[in-house]
Image: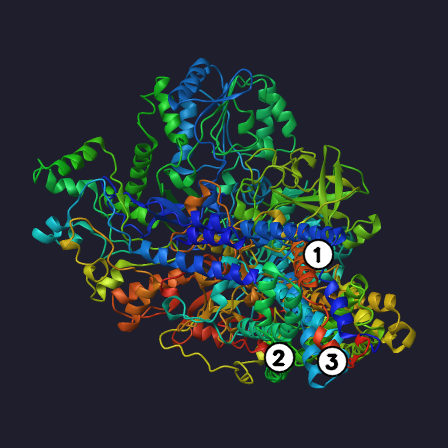
């Protein structure tokens, strides 16, 4: 009806009376098509949830997939899962857009001799692979297999299979890897593993370039721990200092950013140890060790190291004392420079001397990231390929042609391989050069398991039938095995049966009372089998630490800029660049979308006459890229930073031709000790290309302009202030609203919010938020209902970033309501400010009168390219052109909660209704509930002394209360 | 005018209604082409969505509403000059009021379109009308937009009644000189006017009544329009002086528009005897007054922004004078409040070119005023993070151009189908004809 | 003058259209692929509505019976009947039946069956005496006026967000 009516009046709108009549033709009959045989557990219109594990990065967060009528429409964190405890990051939220990505490879394809691609059947595809396998079977490691980091059954199957076909080598390739960390642990403690970092318990954290809130190891878990560590308890708050040349999102959340020279973190750490030992602040060290240690750090005095690192000696002393006195403290590093291993060893020492090892740094849990093959191994593989030793190369879900520095060399080498088979689900750079593409399911469609660390075994189960004619890696391997006559060694007919057999073992070692089926069912239900991480005591190997700590070395001209490439919070190592939500999710620190840019310090910019959005040329000994400038004090003078993830040449419509990839600039030699890729070890020449490049950003101005939208409170002030000060009552213009049943409200703790943007992605997924693309965002027409606002209260060369999620405040005294001429927006009895789309005529008056600017207008009718439309949430209207929309506090969830309560005839319980943003917030900064219910958490928090309303003076009486950010100030000795 | 005779008057004024020449048709054609282009642009916008215009977040209103306010403003000239001057028995009104009223009516036709054009879903515009809608839902009477609907419609109805009533005696004159279908139409519009005493008595009473009714509307309609802005909490809009400020501005622009139109009319139809320099001079003097009021309003606004000590208000003001839209702002100051002061000099207010030029500048200035008020306020509201800019696209511009074409379309028809100067009232100014040997003089 | 005429025409067309819409909302009974007779099933044999429309009390939608459910009885019952033959045909071809919708809501309306049944309404309240209909037809407009009137009458909520999200 709606459509007909619209067309009708459209035509009439231009005065075509005759045309108008044609608008009156009877509606085409709608069809009702029932099941032939109804699906067992599904009730139409009711969601079914499946527990699985997120495989978008190696962190291995537990996931619950919401499916409706057999299609996955939303993912949420699994509350039972020890890693993420119910939370997900933006990347995890976007995994459904991988599943429904319009550019997925829908069936096997074979590259003809002329290079053209032909679709073939699975039978033929496997036959092709089988023949090649049987050809080179067993004659000396001619079959190489590169997978991403796999663990558990999947990993064992690949190993078995490769062994059976007499192949090798086998690589677990991850672009973002931690060789230096692992190697340092081996050298210092004889434990070649990634330990468990207990951020939660630390009273003081020094991060030496580890961006643990964005991409480092397990961001969601760390974010949660960080928030809880930063909570204000018994008048104290744990501190955090970030040491590194770039102000990352993690650094932006620190109390103090110590912008040292790139690669000199090691010396800072060593001189801190020197101070600690000299001032006798060490704890739990045997006399002998103390002497040894003293011996090897004696020369690293703050004075000598100070100017090496580019900070004052006093500063070092202050940091050292603080670190020793805060018990327990924690130092972490990612060691990405040429002396990365040295750095990590120094950090190990630092932790060791103050007794953190065994308390906040616990070995024995053997984090999965430690099992990644080193970058050096990959270079070895390339050598072998070049020597023509590799005949068959199998690439499963890896994209080295994007993430290798010297991808060119790899690509040339590939010409020597007789069969390159890719299992990629997407047409990425690597699939583009493969002879055979055997598209794998996405993880939401397939069986598997994953073990992020020892004791945490996650089951991965398909949430829906495969969307396309794809086949899981395991199934392909097994059927190929049987085709080359390996039924004996690999007897399983499919991966599922193999997986179950593997889990029989787990079942046995669990010594559970129940039978396997129950155990299995329970594991599926909970998402796996979880035990606390085992812990193992380690001793310091004093020999290993008596070493020469190398200064960093850099390729490129001395006086050039040090390039700092870093995995992007939105795209990780580039594998997420084909997700429109993430492309349109503004970067936390720049609010730039759909692009990449280079951060350059204002002083350097001034020196070179560079302005914002000038297109720059970055030239290194090994490559050059064009990338627009973003002038910010967020990088140390003399360094430039570019995020990894953009600049794809193949990867579907959303990724191709956007931004630039800095990796080819890297000189690419592995780090000597650990064999890891040296990320920060290349200098680049920066020149202006003379062109401007239009960057699209959602940011108006990041200066507060005295509007006090983000409010902060010093530790001192907070300790004075015990309970909330009574606020002066402002008189209302209209009679106040009554809320007989509930008054829904929200509290957002700015001290917990880290600005990661997970809430934004979750909201897009829950509420069918349209993607509008770069140009429209550039015009300010992005549609997101919740946005992370960033205000910079610092000086231009010393940013002080504050984040605040801004969404509809559901004002009790809403300025948008009285101005709407047709009652399309009104205040409902439960305190919601409701927007009725089908009543809206689009005067946009409400938006003009909204001081929070949270109302979004549908300038066009949104499009969801097939099959992205399958992700749309059936409980939320898909808005049409010309209507206003905004945050509804997830009213569909509120309704569901209320109906559920009504059915069981009871009251709605506190925490029963949770909007998508609050549900996923990794730091639980957002709390939702009934303000009228005195016992509810939200009601209690709303009375917190830190509570305030944004733009209080306007007397809008928002339902959203913000808690001021606590600013404890820099770290004191 | 004393050298004129009744027959002379009839002849002169009605000769304007003779069948038009080539120049007229070319003008009409050009106008219709622009109009058609505007309609195409609107169609394009309806089909593809408002996104094709330059409107954006946070500047959700821009030149469509600017045009609306501008045209409502223009519409003030007629009723003001006509009704108020009539009530004050100002004699020089006779020559110009007909055109002024026509301007009012046509300006309202134009203004009335924009509230529909700027809707996101214009095909539902009728939901803004006060009638019990589905589920017993009414319009929101608290919304200034609804007040607008009432104010503008009332004003339009009264103005049209006033216009057509004033036409009646003239229509009789025209009726008597036409034949065929024209005769029928004019006969209808003359409402059987015979010029009898009784008819004159009723006519004068009705006319006086309508004049009295129309005068307060001049104040009300633009006050209500101003409340679209003043009722909000937007810095730069939320101000108590808006009503008088807007009314003054409206009259300012109205007078300017009348001058802009009278001068060419007078030339084309050789009506110098009826629209004397004197008339224009009076208008110029009025413009001095309104110009001073407008200038005063600008100062008061600034003063309030400073005195209120309200940060967003003050920052908005500084943004106005220095920001991206500073040029329109200074144009508005210059053209609306400074340039008109030149009329203090007799040589200038009595020279046709100067009058015409300055009138044009005031029209531009007043359009800019509305643009500045609407756009700068929205561009820099409370939340700095969502500050933004507006730039018009070809659609905005085409539709605006189309609206001018639409206005002049009616005006052109008016010039040919109705007497542009009131025959009757001009005659009132003349000595009645006397019968002598030579015949009737 | 012209514009008056235009407006007049416009208003007329508008009215004509509204009327048409109202009429179409009370659409006459469509011809279904199988001439299923509610009178026999629900009427003569007193089969409860929810025996076939199984979700009505649990979910938003009442649910159209699966072919399997039909065949449950019609393997034996009235197997000879020509319409049942048709059904068997669909079943054996494993071809889904395509019924023509009689009652529908615009997609911006969220109607849920179960709360209405819970609150004591019968199917007949909205769908009419289906058990007497050989061919089902719409008996109420079920447009917003209709819904709101009933909600007002029964003091049910008339908060917009109950139906529009």
Q: Nearer the viewer, mark 2 or mark 1?
A: 1
On the same chain, marks 3 and 1? The answer is yes
User: Considering the numbered disc 3 on the image, is that residue within a helix, a strand or a loop?
Assistant: helix
Q: Which residue is mark 2?
A: B217
Image coords of residue A693 (percent x, y) = 72, 45
Q: Nearer the viewer, mark 3 or mark 2?
A: 3
Instruction: Look at the picture and state if A356 lies above or below A564.
Output: below
The answer to whether mark 3 and mark 2 are in CB contact below 8 A is no
Quadrant housing the C terminus of chain B: bottom right
The answer to whether mark 2 and mark 1 are in CB contact below 8 A is no
Q: What crowding class fits label 2: few (fewer than 14 Cα within 10 Å), some (14-19), or many (20 or more)?
A: many
Residue A912 seen in render: no
Mark-to-mark CA distance, 3 and 1: 28 Å
Q: Which residue is mark 3?
A: B428
Quadrant in the picture for residue A495: top left
Image coords of residue C78 (percent x, y) = 8, 39
Quadrant in the picture for residue B312: bottom right
Image coords of residue B431 (percent x, y) = 78, 82
Q: Residue at x 10, y 37 (%)?
A: C81
Instruction: Look at the picture and state if A591 lies above or below B372.
Output: above
Dot placed on the residue nearer the N-terminal end, 3 or 1: 1
Foreground pick, B309 / A549: B309
Left or right position of A442 against A906: right
């Amino acid at each position: 009806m709606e459509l007909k009516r619209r067309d009708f009046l459209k035509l009439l709108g231009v005065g075509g009376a005759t045309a108008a009549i044609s608008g009156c033709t009877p509606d085409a009959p709608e069809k009702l098509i029932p099941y032939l045989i109804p699906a067992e557990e599904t009730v139409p219109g009711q969601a079914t949830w499946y527990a699985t594990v997120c495989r978008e990065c190696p962190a291995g967060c537990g996931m619950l997939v919401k499916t409706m009528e057999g299609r996955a429409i939303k993912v949420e964190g699994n509350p039972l899962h020890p890693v993420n405890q119910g939370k997900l990051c933006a990347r995890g939220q976007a995994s459904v857009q991988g599943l429904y990505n319009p550019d997925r490879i829908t069936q096997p394809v074979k590259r003809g001799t002329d290079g053209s691609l032909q679709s073939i059947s699975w039978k033929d595809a496997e036959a092709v692979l089988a023949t090649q396998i049987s050809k080179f079977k067993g004659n000396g490691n001619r079959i190489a297999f590169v997978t991403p980091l796999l663990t558990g059954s999947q990993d064992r199957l690949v190993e078995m299979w490769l062994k059976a076909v007499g192949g090798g080598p086998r690589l677990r390739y991850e672009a973002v890897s931690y060789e230096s960390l692992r190697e340092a642990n081996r050298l210092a403690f004889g434990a070649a593993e990634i330990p468990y970092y207990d951020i939660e318990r630390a009273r003081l954290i020094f991060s030496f370039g580890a961006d643990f809130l964005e991409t480092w190891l397990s961001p969601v878990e760390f974010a949660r721990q960080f928030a809880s560590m930063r909570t204000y308890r018994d008048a104290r708050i744990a501190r955090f200092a970030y040491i590194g040349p770039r102000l990352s999102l993690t650094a932006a959340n620190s109390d103090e950013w110590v912008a040292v020279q790139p690669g000199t973190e090691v010396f800072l750490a060593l001189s801190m140890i020197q101070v600690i030992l000299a001032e006798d602040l060490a704890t739990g060290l045997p006399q002998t060790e103390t002497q040894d240690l003293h011996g090897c750090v004696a020369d690293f005095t703050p004075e000598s190291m100070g100017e090496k690192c580019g900070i004052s000696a006093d500063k070092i002393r202050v940091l050292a004392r603080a670190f020793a006195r805060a018990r327990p403290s924690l130092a972490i590093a990612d060691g990405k420079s040429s002396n990365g291993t040295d750095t990590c060893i120094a950090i190990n020492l630092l932790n060791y001397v103050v007794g953190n090892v065994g308390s906040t740094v616990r070995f024995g849990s053997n984090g999965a990231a430690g099992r990644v093959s080193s970058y050096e191994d990959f270079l070895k593989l390339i050598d072998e390929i070049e020597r023509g030793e590799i005949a068959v190369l199998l690439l499963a879900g890896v994209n080295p042609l994007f993430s290798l520095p010297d991808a060119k060399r790899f690509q040339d080498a590939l010409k020597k391989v007789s069969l390159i088979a890719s299992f990629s689900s997407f047409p990425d750079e690597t699939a583009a050069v493969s002879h055979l593409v055997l598209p794998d399911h996405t993880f939401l469609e397939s069986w598997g398991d994953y073990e992020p660390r020892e004791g945490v075994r996650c089951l991965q189960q398909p949430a829906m039938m495969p969307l396309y004619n794809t086949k899981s890696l395991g199934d392909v391997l097994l059927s190929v095995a049987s085709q080359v006559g390996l039924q004996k060694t690999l007897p399983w007919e499919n991966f599922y049966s193999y997986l179950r057999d593997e889990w029989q073992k787990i079942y046995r070692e669990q010594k559970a009372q129940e039978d396997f089926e129950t155990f299995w069912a329970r594991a599926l239900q909970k998402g796996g089998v979880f035990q606390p991480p085992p812990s193992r005591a380690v001793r310091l190997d004093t020999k290993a630490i008596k070493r020469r700590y190398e200064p960093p070395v850099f390729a490129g001209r001395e006086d050039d800029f040090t390039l700092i490439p870093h995995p992007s919070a939105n795209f990780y190592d580039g594998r997420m660049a084909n997700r429109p939500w993430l492309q349109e999710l503004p970067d936390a620190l720049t609010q730039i979308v759909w692009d990449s840019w280079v951060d350059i310090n204002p002083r350097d910019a001034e020196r070179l006459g560079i302005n914002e959005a000038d297109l720059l040329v970055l030239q290194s000994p090994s490559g050059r890229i064009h990338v627009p400038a973003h002038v910010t004090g967020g990088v140390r003078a003399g360094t430039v930073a570019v995020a990894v993830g953009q600049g794809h040449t193949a990867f579907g419509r959303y990724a191709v031709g956007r931004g630039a990839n800095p990796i080819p600039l890297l000189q690419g030699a592995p780090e000597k000790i650990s064999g890891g890729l040296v990320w920060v070890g290349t200098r680049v020449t920066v020149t202006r290309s003379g062109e401007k490049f239009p960057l699209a950003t959602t940011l108006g101005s990041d200066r507060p302009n005295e509007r006090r939208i983000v409010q902060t409170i010093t530790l001192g002030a907070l300790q004075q202030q015990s309970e909330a000060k009574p606020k002066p009552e402002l008189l209302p213009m209209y009679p106040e609203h009554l809320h007989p049943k509930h008054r829904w409200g929200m509290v957002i703790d700015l001290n917990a919010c880290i600005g990661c943007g997970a809430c934004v992605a979750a909201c897009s997924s829950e509420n069918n938020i349209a993607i509008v693309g770069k140009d429209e965002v550039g015009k300010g027409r992005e549609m997101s209902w919740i946005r992370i606002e960033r205000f910079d209260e610092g000086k231009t060369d010393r940013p002080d970033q504050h984040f605040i999620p801004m969404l509809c405040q559901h004002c009790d005294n809403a300025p948008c309501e009285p101005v709407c001429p047709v009652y399309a927006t009104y205040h409902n009895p439960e305190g919601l400010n409701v927007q009725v789309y089908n009543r809206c005529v689009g005067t946009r008056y409400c938006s003009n009168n909204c001081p929070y600017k949270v109302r979004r207008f549908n300038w066009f009718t949104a499009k969801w390219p097939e099959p992205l439309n399958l992700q749309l949430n059936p409980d939320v209207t898909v808005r049409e052109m010309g209507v206003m929309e905004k945050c509804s506090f997830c009213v569909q969830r509120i309704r569901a909660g209320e109906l559920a309560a009504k059915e069981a005839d009871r009251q709605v319980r506190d925490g029963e209704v949770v909007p998508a943003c609050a549900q996923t917030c990794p730091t639980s900064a957002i709390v939702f509930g009934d303000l009228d219910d005195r016992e509810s958490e939200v009601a209690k928090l709303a009375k917190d002394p830190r509570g305030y309303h944004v733009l209080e003076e306007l007397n809008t009486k928002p339902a959203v209360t913000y808690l001021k950010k606590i600013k404890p100030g820099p770290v004191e000795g | 005018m004393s050298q004129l005779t009744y027959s002379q008057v009839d002849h002169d004024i009605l000769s304007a209604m003779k069948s038009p020449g080539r120049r007229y048709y070319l003008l009409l054609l050009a106008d219709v082409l622009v109009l058609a282009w505007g309609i195409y642009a609107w169609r394009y916008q309806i089909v593809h969505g408002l996104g094709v215009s330059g409107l954006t977040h946070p500047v959700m209103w821009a030149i469509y509403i600017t045009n609306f306010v501008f045209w409502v403003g223009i519409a003030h000239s007629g009723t003001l000059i006509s009704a108020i001057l009539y009530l004050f028995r100002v004699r020089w009104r006779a020559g110009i009021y007909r055109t002024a009223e026509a301007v009012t009516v046509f300006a309202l036709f134009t203004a009335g379109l924009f509230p529909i054009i700027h809707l996101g879903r214009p095909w539902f515009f009728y939901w803004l009308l006060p009638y019990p809608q589905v589920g017993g839902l009414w319009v929101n009477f608290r919304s200034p937009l609804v007040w607008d609907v009432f104010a503008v419609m009332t004003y339009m109805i009264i103005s049209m009644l006033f216009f057509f009533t004033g036409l009646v005696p003239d229509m009789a004159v025209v009726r008597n000189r036409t034949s065929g279908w024209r005769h029928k139409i004019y006969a209808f519009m003359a409402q059987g006017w015979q010029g009898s005493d009784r008819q004159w008595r009723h006519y004068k009473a009705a006319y006086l009544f309508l004049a009295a009714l129309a005068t307060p509307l001049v104040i009300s309609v633009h006050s209500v329009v101003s409340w679209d802005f003043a009722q909000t909490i937007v810095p730069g809009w939320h101000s108590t002086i808006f009503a008088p400020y807007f009314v003054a501005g409206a009259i300012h622009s109205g007078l300017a528009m009348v001058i802009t139109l009278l001068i060419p009319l007078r030339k084309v139809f050789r009506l110098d005897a009826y629209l004397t320099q004197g008339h224009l001079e009076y208008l110029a003097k009025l413009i001095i007054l309104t110009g001073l009021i407008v200038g005063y309003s600008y100062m008061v606004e600034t003063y309030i922004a400073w005195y209120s000590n309200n940060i967003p208000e003050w920052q908005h003001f500084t943004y106005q004078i220095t920001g991206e839209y500073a040029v329109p702002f200074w144009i508005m100051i210059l053209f609306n409040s400074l340039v008109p002061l030149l009329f203090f000099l007799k040589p200038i207010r009595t020279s046709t070119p100067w009058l015409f030029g300055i009138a044009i500048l005031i029209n531009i200035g007043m359009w800019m005023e509305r643009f500045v008020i609407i756009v700068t306020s929205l561009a820099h509201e409370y939340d700095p993070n969502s500050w933004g800019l507006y730039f018009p696209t070809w659609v905005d511009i085409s539709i605006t151009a189309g609206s001018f074409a639409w206005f002049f379309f009616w005006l052109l028809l008016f010039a040919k189908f109705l007497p542009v100067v009131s025959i009757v009232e001009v005659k009132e100014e003349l000595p009645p004809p006397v019968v002598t040997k030579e015949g009737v003089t | 003058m012209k514009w008056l005429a235009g407006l007049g025409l416009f208003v007329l067309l508008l009215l004509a259209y509204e009327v048409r819409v109202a009429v179409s909302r009370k659409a006459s009974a469509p011809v279904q692929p199988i001439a299923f007779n509610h009178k026999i099933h629900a009427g003569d044999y007193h089969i409860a509505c929810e025996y076939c429309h199984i979700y009505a009390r649990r979910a938003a939608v009442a649910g159209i019976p699966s072919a399997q459910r039909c065949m449950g009885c019609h393997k034996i019952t009235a197997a000879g009947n020509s319409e049942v033959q048709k059904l068997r045909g669909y079943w054996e071809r494993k071809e889904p039946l395509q019924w023509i919708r009689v009652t529908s809501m615009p997609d911006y309306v969220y109607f849920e069956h179960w709360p209405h049944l819970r609150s004591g309404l019968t199917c007949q309240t909205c769908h009419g005496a289906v058990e007497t209909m050989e061919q089902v037809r719409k008996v109420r407009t079920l447009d917003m006026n209709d819904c709101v009137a009933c909600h007002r009458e029964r003091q049910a909520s008339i908060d917009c967000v109950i139906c529009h999200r």
